[in-house]
Image (tube, rainbow, N blue to C red):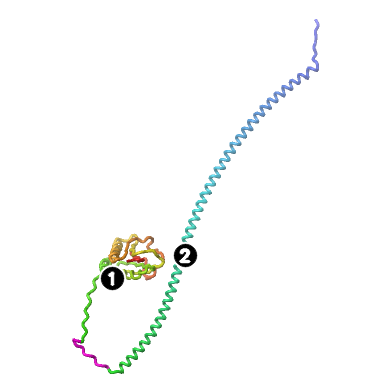
Amino acid sequence: MTTVTVTPTRADKPGTMEIDQLRGWATFMDRAVVVSLVATVLAVTALGVTTWLSWRFNGAVRAQEHAAFDRYKAEMGKHAAALEEDASRARERALEFEQVANDANERAARASRESAAASEKARSAEVDAEEVRKRVAELGKQVREATARAPEPAPAVTAETAPPAKEQPAPAQPSPVVESLKKYAGTKAALYVLEEAPDGGAVGSMIAGYLGDAGWAPLTWTWSGVSGILGVVVLIKEGSDPATDEAASAVLDALRSAGFNAAKGNWPADWRRFRGTLNGPQSPGPTDAPIRIVIGAKAR
């Protein structure tokens, strides 16, 4: 029996090595693909997370911007309201300054008129004094001439030549207006006569005469810088006692019975505040009396 020994040739070794290398490369490529897939998944995940965080961040930024804008609008609204209030106060102050300037101009014009009237009165007084001196001189001359002549006997007075006796006038009957107001004698009243009323002075004097005859304490002021009041308006201070209200009602009824266009009301503001200018007594003041009688145009 013959034994045969086969010896591997060199050609068999390279073939075996190439297969092992291919298997190694395949394994490496599989692992590389897995790693690539894992990296891709991680990248996509990171991109999604980044996108989500960016969206959340942008939303938070927009919300903060909206909140800041709303706060800005609110602050600007408050600022605009404050500016409007300041402008309104400035307009009110400008109107007050204008009113003060108008009052000053009116007082200056009135002072100028009064100065001119005083100058005219002074000139008239000088003329009157000169006239009086002339009259005195003439009377002195006449007296001297009369004393130089002999006095003539006075004619005898007989029953036929005596002048008839004058009849005494009958006593005046008291006015119904005065009689109706005597019950409230001692009441203080302020008469405001509008300067623009054509017959305001005469009506004010008549009403003041009624009140004075009835025992009241009336004082009269001329009211300038006010217009648009018609008739006679009887006003009482808010919160006055019942006696004052009753006296004001009595004045109203008396004026109506005398033919005046009278009405009653309340002072529309603070009792011590008034528009325009009041010219009259300095004491007591024009706002001390609890009853005011305003005399406007078309009082009767």
Mark 2 lies on a secondary structure that is helix
**Badge 1: residue crowd in 10 Å (few <14, some 14–19, many ≥20):** some
Tag on residue 98? Answer: 2
Looking at the picture, does residue 148 appear above or below residue 61? below
139 and 12: which is toward the camera: 139
- Asked whether the beta carbons under mark 2 and mark 1 sit within 8 Å of each other, the answer is no
Q: Residue at x 22, y 90 (%)?
A: 155
- The stretch in magenta equals 151-160
- Specify the quadrant of the image occupied by residue 157: bottom left
Q: Residue at x 33, y 90 (%)?
A: 142
Looking at the picture, does residue 58 appear above or below residue 257? above
Looking at the picture, does residue 193 appear above or below residue 7? below
Tag on residue 237? Answer: none
Q: Earlier in the sequence, mark 2 or mark 1?
A: 2
Mark 1 lies on a secondary structure that is helix
Q: Position of residue 280 (x, y in %)?
A: 38, 70
Tag on residue 213? Answer: 1
Q: Position of residue 194 (x, y in %)?
A: 37, 67
